[in-house]
Image (cartoon, grey):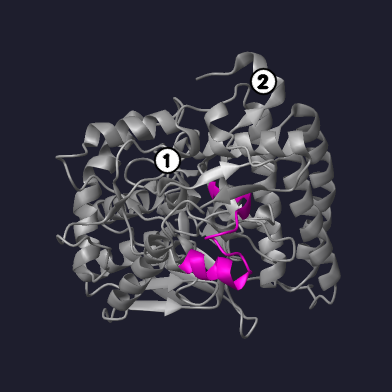
Amino acid sequence: MIVTNYLVIGSGIAGLTFAVKIAEKFPERKVVIVTKDSEDESNTKYAQGGVAVVSDQDQDSFKKHIKDTLRAGDGLCNEEVVKMVVKEGPERLEELLLWGANFDKDSSGAFSLGKEGGHSEYRIIHHKDVTGFEIERALLKRVHQLENIEILPYHFAIDLITDHHITDENVKPETCYGAYVLNQKTGYVFRIKADSTLLATGGVGKVYGHTTNPAIATGDGIAMAYRAKARIKDMEFVQFHPTALYDVEAGSSFLISEAVRGFGAYLRNIKGHRFMPDYDERAELASRDIVSQSIDSELKKSGEPHVYLDCTHLSLKDFKVHFPNIYKECFNRHIDIEKDWIPVVPASHYLCGGIKVNKKGKTTIKNLFACGECSRTGLHGANRLASNSLLEALVYAHNIYKYHCKNDLPEIKFDIPKWNDDGTVITEEHILIQHNLRELQALMRDYVGIVRNNRRLKKAIKRLDVIYQEVEDLYRESKVTTALCELRNMVNVAHLIIQQSLDRKENRGGYFNSDNIEVVVG
């Protein structure tokens, strides 16, 4: 058993920011970071666009950023949270700069600001088209300079340890005491006993299969919190990124950043018609929900598998400077952006809901906090404004840090039982895991996509029940593996998305149910 003061599950911007801050503040205390892949593999690493921050108050203002966020969230944002996050942005950016993160500047030395869908001003601070990669690099460098932080890569958190696992009379109900963790290299499951646990596990994109997220985005933190009886909210609001590169042979979707449309690219249908002005006065710079639904409409009308992003009228020289990674990826796939339109299609990108937290990042379970995409803060409402996610992670990591500075850690005086896998065997039924995974992902794409209806959602629940039973049977009988645990988590997440979709009776932001068309709001 490992005993630590702070357990952080996840190594993206949310988890690393908290770890750095708390380790600097309390050098005598121990921080353990558990991450299921390499230490730098996270959703953060793949964030292309940047951080939405009001940095030039002569041209921009907090009021404008707040208004843009509220408009994108379609009436479901927590306005207090929006104001807090937006106004804290400049301070949190300064900390990133102090930790060594580099962002693009113009010839005058000022930040080179981008503009993305839903934003009324240029306010996106970025590092080329690999902003998340640069932030991850800077944070990990700082982590390695702090001796009281231990990172455990290739370790998978299976379940949170709560009062359900402990019989001691001193145990408190609805309280977290750490996690059971699988060493993926040895197959051994051990306990991490923690005074405070932070879930910073990222998103759920892999539930849909076609996603801009990395393979690790299987909703682990949300599923663990759900099984621990934490409150989960707004799971119906799955944001689809409008422009993932369409490649029928690719195993994953490559993201064509929203900033490319902010740079001036046009969306065209199969006939070459620039269609976005037909749907919204902001055209290509409408919010993601509107652009994705518009593309979905065009695809249904044409029967084609994709639309196009036209960059041929843009300066190739400037494009290469701003989007070198995107240019390289297109070139490697034999797409010459100076002459060719880029085939694009919406793909699962971001979850606006998740583990419900307050402004301090506290979940409904004691000693359990959540931050980043796995959390539901109230910032995004029904639809996330582009590049607000990295900002949210920075602000909430700081708020959780501030809470821990002002509050004593609880004292855990009892032991935690070892992981019990008596009666289980090493499974050789990997085909069952892969079959159920493919079926689950097809189910979510076909029945729970951009446009939903009650009939398909109810059918999805019935089909999911069969998958759930097979997976639970396999889980009870088998020694745990990462693939099996991830599938179990994705089934839990799929259930939450479907059920909360059925519970919503009006269309808002990223949620569109054709049976609710009579009660459209906004």
SS under mark 2: helix
In the rendered image, the vertical position of residue 424 relative to residue 233, given as above or below:
below
SS under mark 1: loop
Amino acid type indicated by mark 2: Asn
Give the camera-side residue of 6 and 497: 497
The residue tagged 2 is 516
**Residue farthest to the bottom?**
186
Residue 232 placed where, x, y %? 54, 41
The residue tagged 1 is 385
Horizontal side, residue 203 vs residue 112: left or right: right
Sort mark 1 into few (<14), some (14-19) or many (20+) by Cα contacts within 10 Å.
many
Q: In which quarter of the image is residue 142?
A: bottom left
Residue 194 placed where, x, y %? 41, 66
Q: Quadrant of residue 3?
A: bottom left
Segment colored magenta: 325-350
Mark toward the start of the polypeptide (1 vs 2) = 1
In the rendered image, the vertical position of residue 430 relative to residue 108, given as above or below:
below
Give the camera-side residue of 402 and 261: 261
The numbered dot on residue 481 is: none
Amino acid type indicated by mark 1: Leu
How far apart marks 1 and 2 lie (CA) works out to 24 Å
Residue 5 placed where, x, y %? 34, 68
